[in-house]
Amino acid sequence: MKIHKAMSFQAYIDNIKAKTGKSPADFKELAEQNGFIIDGKLNPAVKATEITNWLKAEFALGHGHAMAIYATFKGKKE
């Protein structure tokens, strides 16, 4: 039986950067262009699912990685 160690938040961010070439700041800028973030804050009219679906479709991120980027939009840093 193989046991998987949980990835750290930073490991998720590092993997996303390696896969897409984009940092959380890059994704935030793109999210602003798409209306998901307004004046640096999440648009209250937008559901988390809309953002994670966009990240999955546009950047081929898995659910966990999309949630990690969404978490950075909410202010998570580590």
Image (cartoon, rainbow, N blue to C red):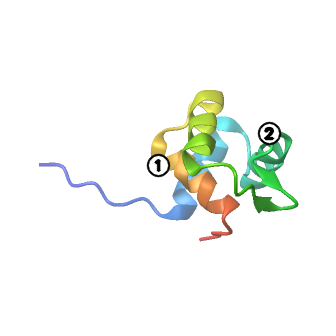
The kind of residue tagged 1 is Gly
- Residue 13, how many percent across, how many down? 60, 54
Pair 2/1: label in front? 2
- Residue 75, how many percent across, how many down? 68, 69
Residue 34's quadrant in the figure?
top right
Identify the residue position indicated by label 2 in the image.
34
Q: Residues within 10 Å of mark 1 (few under 14, many from 20)?
A: few
Element under label 1?
helix
Report the residue that reaches farthest toward the left.
1
Specify the label residue 64 is tagged with: 1
Residue 62 falls left or right of residue 58: left
**On screen, residue 9 above or below 50:** below
Residue 20's quadrant in the figure?
top right
Residue 44 falls left or right of residue 64: right
The kind of residue tagged 2 is Asn
The foreground one among 36 and 8 is 36
The foreground one among 49 and 12 is 49
Residue 16's quadrant in the figure?
top right
Q: Residue at x 65, y 70 (%)?
A: 77
Report the residue that reaches farthest toward the front.
45
Is the C terminus in the top left, top right, bottom left or bottom right quadrant? bottom right
- Residue 9, how many percent across, how many down? 53, 63
Residue 1 falls left or right of residue 40: left
Q: Residue at x 63, y 69 (%)?
A: 76
Q: Residue at x 88, y 60 (%)?
A: 39
